Amino acid sequence: MVGMVFRFHGLEVSGFVIPRFSGDGCFAGTELPRPHDTRPRARRKQSIHDSWLMERRRSSAIDHGACGDLAAELTARFPDDPHPIHTVYIRRPFSSIAHHFHVLITFALFSIPIGLLLLAPRRARNHPLSSSFPSDAQTTDDDKDDETASKMAPKKKIAIMTSGGDSPGMNAVVRACVRMAIYLGCDPYCIYEGYEGLVRGGDLIRKMEWHDVRGWLSEGGTLIGTARCMAFYEREGRLAAAKNLIAHGIDALIICGGDGSLTGADRFRAEWPSLLDELVEKGEFTEEEVTPYRHLNIVGLVGSIDNDLSGTDATIGCYSALQRICAAVDLIEATASSHSRAFVIEVMGRHCGWLALMAGVATGADFIFIPEKPREDNWREEMCRIVENHRKRGKRKTIVIIAEGALDREGNKITPQMVRDLLADKNGLAIDTRITTLGHVQRGGTAVAYDRMLATLQGVEAVKAVLDATPEMPTWVIAITENKIVRKPLMQAVQDTKKVAAAIESQDFDLAMSLRDAEFAEQYRSFMMTTAVQVNKEMLLPEKDRMRIGFINVGAPAGGMNAAVRAGVAYCLSRGHEPIAIYNGFAGFARHHDDQPVGSVRPFDWLEVDGWASKGGSEIGTNRELPSESGMETIANLIEQYRLDALFLIGGFEAFHAVSQLRKARDQYPSLCIPMTLLPATISNNVPGTEYSLGSDTCLNELVEYCDKIKQSASATRRRVFVIETQGGRSGYIATLGGLGVGASAVYTPEEGITLDMLATDVKHLKDVFAHDKGQSRAGRLILINEKASKVYNARLIADILRDEAHGRFEAREGIPGHMQQGGVPSPMDRCRAVRLAIRCIQHLEQFGRGVHNRVKNDPMSATVIGIKGASVVFTPIQKLEEEETDWPNRRPKTAFWLPLTEIVDILSGRPKHKKPEPELTGLKAKDVKRGLDDL
């Protein structure tokens, strides 16, 4: 029988020696290696010894017993071996076992327990929901030795990095990437200080655990740092970066930064194969060591307050920066109006005027300057004409917003000082004018709700994209189009962005505007229309096409209602239509239309309406009364009495119901055969036909700000849970998106319901979390519950249950923000979208014209809802919505686009899986089951 060869080679792990055998010939006893000898290089020499011994065994007969000549020959052949060979033994298989039985016993006693110890915690960490809490309570010392452990249980390693200028929301990206990577069984790493950390390596590349990113949602800037790195511009710097990634076993990189940072990442990926070849040539690694990392996966996320990357509607941080700008302008307007002054406000944007444009739309500024669209040849004359017109109408304040990269038609820079001198010219307008440069205050502060949601969803998608990537795929950038998260080729987006800058430099401004997204150009047209009301006579329609359009708000107040009315009125006046205000909804219309001295139906005063852009609530009033409650015949007669040619409604589900009632009553009342359209405005976001409603973003901002303060209190008192009740009717949109924005431990919605099993699971989860908590300052927890999630369980009852089940181990309190969720200054997003969608609505109505009763009656598009669906702004016939898409008993759409987000909320909070509630039985089925006549 041919003898078996066993080679003994020491491997030091956690202070023990684990023998390793190869079945090729000899058993060679060696010295116990030093800790640093456990590198791959030592294993390579072992395999060389084994191969040589096997050939030697085949080439000559070797006697049994100790072979001193073989040992000497082996030592002579490999003089540089750090593990000298003392003796080579040759045994037949069974005699080998008998002769060295104590060696086999040693192997069994040491290797099996140590292997179990190494593998067990790895398996436990593979899925954070496999226990009642994730890595918050599973931090072990052996995590530090992942080089050795990874040999036992290899995992995909993903690095996350922030680069370029900081922007609010970057911390939400890091949190989402880290936790999603852990959830999917990967090891996340953070590269501190951007590309500088990538080049320097060392402790700037750190493995992250679940609890490391706790509390990051409410932090501004980037907690892992960002820095300029000149070394990365050189190949030697990129070579060092590649070496550091290979040393940590990383071949997947997620980068959040601007177009410059993402361009550098794509170049790094393109050079990756040649960088690895160079590292092998220099002897840093062997071919075997780099083979598993031959493909570098990179995914980009755009973190930029300028919103300057083409191909996405919004970049991470842009709406937070816009919030800072609008808040500053709102404050400045008060002092400007008090002293009848003009203010020139400079905002960021060297090559992109998005911040200046959106701030102008949201605040109702008098004039703006952006790089993509310089004003006409004589901008001085144009600005003076518009400002003078506003002043003659009685306007006491003048606001001019200028981007830092503003140019004239000749490519010359326009500075705030130039604008200030023109407005203050004593031979001209002679207005007391001041300059305000906002500077880096635009970058500061925590992220608004939208940026937290965007960063979180894009971070989750980035992890999925980096795992899906193949060598044939392009480098992806995660973008958003309207409400849809999408992957797009990174370099295509970067090239389109650079084309904008090149077009501006070559003074091809039409091309620059066309390269921006459709919303940018539409918002610019909207601004021009609302700022030049009754100035541009070319926009006026012929007399026969001008209409009387009624404006009415229905339902609860919502942020953005006034901005929508202002934009609609501005468009009407610019086109020659007559906008008619109907105050206090259908109740005011029916019962107070002819009150003296002022009735509820009257024309708008533009000077008054012009100041509504930043006002919350509803300046023309609103209530929930439906036309059927006011009297359908009365409403029909009043529409005829006031000669209304169209009706523009703004509101929530009550407004939707009102349009439905008016449409159905057309056969009975011919005067209702006029075009009507609804602009959804409700914090509940429960109107069928749209994925977005005015006021929902304002509500989320208020709720997130409230929860941040509550969470701070919960954290300060360490082990405390707050149960927060949100509004939203029978729609869980606000609770779910709020939970995504504040990192709630659990969210209860009407769509899912609440059961005792769910509560028991969540109570156990919280008890386990607090049991392993070490008193860190961010130990507070939040639970969000929709006001109608259950007929039995409310915020107070759940807090009482938690408090009782805690048995003194942690505290529980309830918090009810109530109607403060409806109030406050509307968010910039609600204001900007209100302007855009309101103008779209009036344009839709004016297509029908006057006196078209027969056409309207037979046209489904004469009664519509405007909405954002996926990547489009669409008008949907109310008849189709009420028949196919409306859950009338629950006052919401049959399908909710946001429902999949509940899973992401649960994953990122570490919430355990729980049993879903059973569907509720109704009608005869419920009666039969209760009587035992039917199965459960």
Image (cartoon, grey):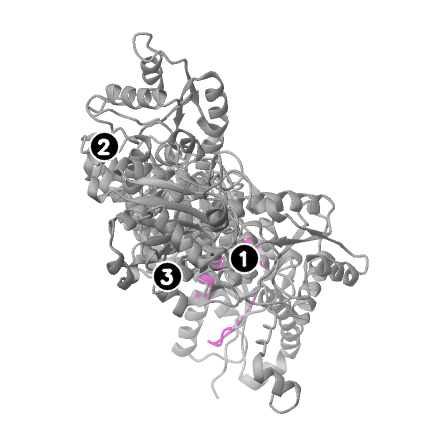
Towards the viewer: 136 or 44: 136
- Position of residue 921 relative to residue 552, above or below, is below
Q: Which residue is mark 2?
A: 504
* Residue 373, picture quadrant: top left
The answer to whether marks 1 and 3 mark residues whose Cβ atoms lie closer than 8 Å is no
Towards the viewer: 718 or 404: 404
For residue 32: magenta?
yes
Q: Position of residue 737 (x, y in %)?
A: 52, 54
Q: Which disc number belongs to residue 305?
A: none
Q: Which disc number belongs to residue 663?
A: 3
Left or right, residue 822 beside residue 872: right
Residue range in magenta is 22-47
Quick one: label 1 or label 3, which is nearer the N terminus?
3
For residue 595: magenta?
no
Mark 3 residue crowding within 10 angstroms, few (<14) / some (14–19) / many (20+): many
Q: Which disc number belongs to residue 736?
A: 1
Towards the viewer: 720 or 778: 720
Left or right, residue 345 beside residue 533: right
- Position of residue 924 relative to residue 708, above or below, is below
Mark 2 residue crowding within 10 angstroms, few (<14) / some (14–19) / many (20+): many
Q: Amino acid at mark 2?
A: Ile
In front of the other: label 3 or label 2? 3
Residues under labels 1 and 3: Cα distance?
Answer: 33 Å
- Position of residue 113 relative to residue 429, above or below, is below
Quick one: label 1 or label 2, which is nearer the N terminus?
2
Give the secondary structure at mark 1: helix
Q: Amino acid at mark 3?
A: Arg
Q: Name the residue rendered at 32%, 10% in the picture.
A: 425
